[in-house]
Amino acid sequence: MERGLSGREAVYVHVGGCWNAGKRSKGVTREQALHALAEGVKVCPQCEPDNALGFLD
């Protein structure tokens, strides 16, 4: 999960090891990632975590 400049809000969900994840990224559980996607956090267009997690919006 990549956080914004403030460190509070999530701005992108990435697959672990994504080359496009920024320095403000940290690992989260599968459940946390799915919750973030359900809440509308954007997916990384390069690694497509929604597909990897089987998330259907």
Image (cartoon, grey):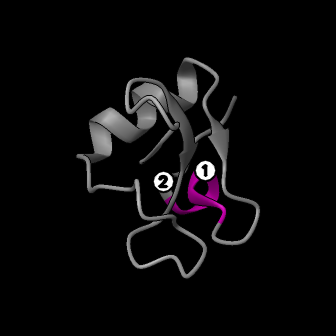
Specify the farthest residue to the right: 45
Residue assigned mark 2: 53
Spatial CA span between label 2 and label 1: 5 Å
Residue assigned mark 1: 50
Q: Position of residue 42 (x, y in %)?
A: 68, 38
Q: Is residue 45 left or right of residue 35?
A: right
Where disc 1 sits, the SS reads helix
Q: Is residue 19 left or right of residue 15?
A: right
Q: Position of residue 12 (x, y in %)?
A: 58, 45
- Out of 22 and 34, give the one closest to the viewer: 22
Q: Residues within 10 Å of mark 1 (few under 14, many from 20)?
A: many
Relative to residue 50, is residue 9 depicted above or below?
A: above
- Out of 29 and 7, give the one closest to the viewer: 7
Q: Quadrant of residue 7?
A: top left
Q: Position of residue 47 (x, y in %)?
A: 63, 70
Dominant SS of magenta comes to helix
Q: Please name the residue shown 55% across and 82% down the image.
A: 19
User: At label 1, which amino acid type do we have?
Assistant: Asp
Residue 36: assigned label: none
What are the residue bounds of the magenta stretch?
A: 48-52
Q: Please name the residue shown 39% across and 56% down the image.
A: 25
Where disc 2 sits, the SS reads helix
The reply to whether discs 2 and 1 touch (Cβ–Cβ < 8 Å) is yes
Q: Please name the residue shown 43% across and 35% down the image.
A: 34
User: Is 43 covered by the magenta stretch?
Assistant: no
